[in-house]
Amino acid sequence: MTNKITNTKLEAPGLDAFQCGALITNKHRNIIYANAYFSNELNWQVEKLIGKSSDDLFTFSSKIFIESYLMPLLLHEKKCDEIQLALLDGKNNRISIIVNAKMDDQGHIYWSLFNATKRDKLYEELIETRNKLEAQAKILQSMSVTDELTGLMNRREINLRAPELLNQAKRYVHTVALLMIDIDHFKEVNDSYGHLEGDRVLKELGLRLKTFGRQTDLIARFGGEEFIMLLPDTDASDARLFAERLHKLVSEIHVNCTPVTVSIGITMSDGSHSLEDLTKQADTALYKAKSNGRNRTEFDQTSIYTG
C-alpha cells in the first residue's frame, strides 16, 4: 500500500498501534503527521501538533544539536540513526528519547521517537554499580598491599617495591639503610594484658612509624611484632640518628604505665644487595641488639657500614 501525505494526516492503517512516536515534517520542518503515541504517552493533542514546527517539541540544547549535527547529516546522508535527544511533552516535562530520522527527496522527514527514560535509568544504575565495583576494587587493592591492623604496607608489597628502590640507589650511587625493628617483650604484653592491648601497641607503633618516616621511605609490618623500614639516600650516620629518635618516639607508647621499647638492627647497602640479603643482615644485627640487653640499636658489620 502506498502512503499518501496530506497537510493533516497520513492515511495508512495500524500506525497508531506502534509503541513509538511516528512523526512526519515537511521541508519547512512543520509537522504534517503525528501518531496517537503523542497523545497516549506524551500528553500532546495530536490535532494541535499539526502545523507546529518540530523544533517546538525539543529542549533548547536538543535544538542546537539538531541544527548542528542531525540536519546536516540528513541533508548529506538522508538518514540518521539512534540519536539521543530531549523532548518536551504536552505538560512541558523533559523526556529522554532516541530518534531515528530519514529524509526523502522532497525534504519530508520521517521521525521515529523511542522513549529512553528506562534506558537512562538503567544506564544510571549501571554507572552506580560500576562506581560501587570500582570502590570495592580499590578497597580490595588496598587490602592486598596493606597490613589491616597497622595501615602500613604488608610484607608482600615491600617485597614488590623494594627492588626498584635498590636499583635507583645503585643507579644514582646512593646508600640505603634498612632497619629491622622488633618490639621488646611483646609476648609478655599479650600474655599479661591480652591481645587487644597488644593490637593497640602495634597500631600505635605503626602510626608513629608512618608519621616519622619520609614520603620516599618504605615502611612495612614484616610479621608479628616486627617492622621494617627501607630508607633511601641515607648514610650510616643518618641511620643511627634516625634510630635514636625512633627509640624516643616509641617510648611515648605505654603499657600499664611502662614505656614500650624496641630493638633495632640496621644494615647498609649501595643498592647491589637484594632485599632478602639485607633483611638477613639486619636480622643478625637485631639479634645482637636483643642479646645485648634490648632497647638498643646495632649495625650489621658485614654491610658497607663505616660509621
Image (tube, helix red, strand yellow):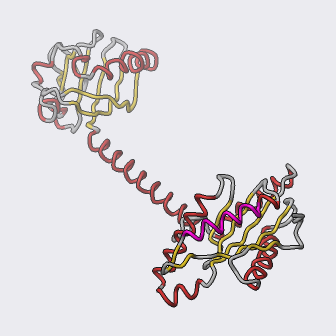
Q: Residue at x 42, y 52 (%)?
A: 130
Residue 259: image location, x then y, percent: 56, 76
Residue 231: image location, x then y, percent: 73, 59
Residue 105 in the figure: left or right of residue 200: left
Instruction: Reply yes or no: does residue 250 show up in magenta.
Output: yes
Residue 51 in the figure: left or right of residue 69: left
Location of the N terminus (image quadrant): top left
Q: In the orientation shown, which residue stands out farthest toward the bottom?
A: 191
Camera-side residue: 190 or 153?
Answer: 190
Residue 96: name its quadrant.
top left
Instruction: Reply yes or no: does residue 34 show up in magenta.
Output: no
48 over 87 or under it: above or below = above
289 over 133 or under it: above or below = below
Residue 59: image location, x then y, percent: 26, 23
112 over 221 or under it: above or below = above
Q: Residue at x 45, y 80 (%)?
A: 196
Magenta highlight range: 239-252
Location of the C terminus (image quadrant): bottom right
Residue 160: name its quadrant.
bottom right
291 over 4 or under it: above or below = below
- Determine the main secondary structure of the stretch shown in magenta: helix
Q: Residue at x 27, y 44 (%)?
A: 118
Residue 266 in the figure: left or right of residue 254: right
Residue 203 in the figure: left or right of residue 102: right
Q: In the orientation shown, which residue stands out farthest toward the front?
A: 257
Camera-side residue: 150 or 136?
Answer: 150
Camera-side residue: 35 or 189?
Answer: 189
Camera-side residue: 80 or 232?
Answer: 232
Residue 32: name its quadrant.
top left
